[in-house]
Image (tube, helix red, strand yellow):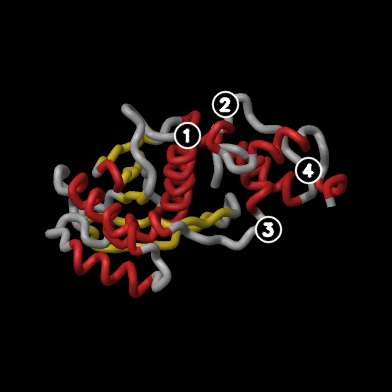
Amino acid sequence: MHACPVRFYYEQREPVTESDRYAICKQLSYHLGKPLDADLIWNEVVAVRPAVDPALREFLGLCITACNKTAWKPAVQTDVRVASDKHGMAGMIDRIDAEGAFSIVRASGAMPFGTYAADRLRIAAIAFCLEEMTGKEVPGGNVEYIPDGVSRHHAVQPRDRRLVIATIHKLREIRDGAMPQHPLNAPCTRCRYKEKCESSVGKRLSELL
């Protein structure tokens, strides 16, 4: 789920792929809370992505150095699929610890304070799913920015829940053929669809095909 519906519009027909950096951070995350063995983790990364750029072995080392500065709780479950029939959405939890706290893993650096809008949206969406599946209120979740070795807890706010519901409505409209307007606070400067977005504002899908 994206904070910007325009990005979803452009990505909905593209194959889902993960970057080498994400693959490294994801593999490292399985070892959080235990000694981080660089050779072991790198061998696992190569097994998962045989074509990974060997130069990224250094990136793994930097991630390990950063993560060793934080006390992590080991996961008792990883890659847990969650879903909400009521809201018509599904997602994946990267890690759940022994106390039931859930985390999502990011391959980006952390903000000086707080979490990115897209991460808050994903945490809130997962909370919706877990609440439907368990019947219990889910107050929030953690975002783990592996390159910086930082874990940030986000307490889900009513505005987050409202945004999830509004985003679901927007995505349904997009699937029905609407070309969305980008929001005022969209992260356009770091978006790879910036030029396409600026050239197609106000059009519908039927006009672009």
Q: Residue furthest front?
A: 55
Q: Earlier in the sequence, mark 4 or mark 1?
A: 1
Q: Amino acid at mark 1?
A: Ala
Mark 3 and mark 1 in contact? Answer it, CB < 8 Å: no
In the figure, 77 relative to 2: above or below?
Answer: below
Determine crowd level at label 4: few under 14, some 14-19, many 20+ residues with C-alpha closer than 10 A.
Answer: some
Mark 4 and mark 2 in contact? Answer it, CB < 8 Å: no
| Foreground of the two, 117 or 128 | 117
**SS class of the residue under badge 2?**
loop
Mark 2 and mark 1 in contact? Answer it, CB < 8 Å: yes
What residue appears at the point 78 percent right and 43 percent down from the top-left corner?
Answer: 178
What whole-number distance in Å separates the C-alpha atoms at marks 4 and 3?
A: 15 Å
Q: Which mark is residue 185?
A: 2
Mark 4 and mark 1 in contact? Answer it, CB < 8 Å: no
In the figure, 84 relative to 124: above or below?
Answer: below
The residue under label 1 is 117
Q: Which mark is residue 40?
A: none
The residue under label 3 is 13
Q: Nearer the viewer, mark 4 or mark 3?
A: 3
